[in-house]
Image (tube, rainbow, N blue to C red):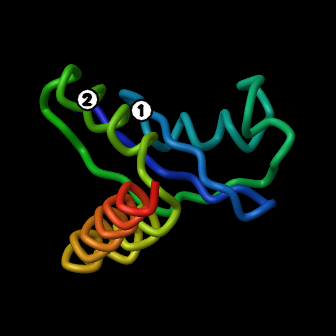
Amino acid sequence: MHYVYILQCADDSYYIGSTWNLEKRIEEHNAGALKGYTSSRLPVKLAWSSDFADEHQAFLVERQLKGWSRAKKEALIRRELEAVHEVVREERRAREAKKRTK
């Protein structure tokens, strides 16, 4: 089993990652054992996770989520899938309106 997860950092930012062992990975983040983004934003807490049977699928989802806006991530964390779709529609309308004003 492979997991994709979103951590909420102490500064209220989000970190997205993937792992084979979710519990161990969160412990590693909070121990500061993983140098990088979260090590200066401790403690972190698990905001969302999902499991995948296929590592490649987990990788694709991780990459997709990293490109999402904060609003989309927060809708996913709340498990409000319709809200995710609404954010997508709003972002699309904003992009299209911006194109028309150029």
Foreground pick, 51 / 13: 13
Discs 2/1, front: 2
Measuring from the top left, give residue 80's x and y in whole percent: 27, 79
Work out whether mark 2 precedes mark 1 in sequence or the reverse, and give the earlier one.
1
User: Residue at image x 26%, y 77%?
Assistant: 86
Measuring from the top left, give residue 37's x and y in whole percent: 73, 34
Label 1 crowding class (10 Å Cα cut-off): few <14, some 14-19, many 20+?
many
Q: Is mark 1 on a helix, strand or loop?
A: strand
- Name the side, left or right, on which 58 lies relative to 24: left
- Say which residue label 1 marks: 18
**Three-letter amino acid code at disc 1?**
Ser
Measuring from the top left, give residue 29's x and y in whole percent: 68, 38
Q: Is mark 2 on a helix, strand or loop?
A: helix
Foreground pick, 17 / 26: 17
Query: What is the CA distance from the residue labelled 2 to the residue labelled 1?
Result: 10 Å
- Name the side, left or right, on which 9 lies relative to 91: right
- Name the side, left or right, on which 75 lies relative to 44: left
Quadrant in which residue 72 is drawn = bottom left
Seen from this angle, which residue lies furthest front? 102
Which label belongs to residue 60?
A: 2
User: Residue at image x 81%, y 50%?
Assistant: 42
Quadrant in which residue 90 is drawn = bottom left
- Name the side, left or right, on which 9 lies relative to 54: right
User: Residue at image x 80%, y 33%?
Assistant: 32
In the image, residue 42 sits, relative to residue 29, either above or below, namely below
Quadrant in which residue 63 is drawn = top left
User: Residue at image x 59%, y 43%?
Assistant: 26
**Three-letter amino acid code at disc 2?**
Leu
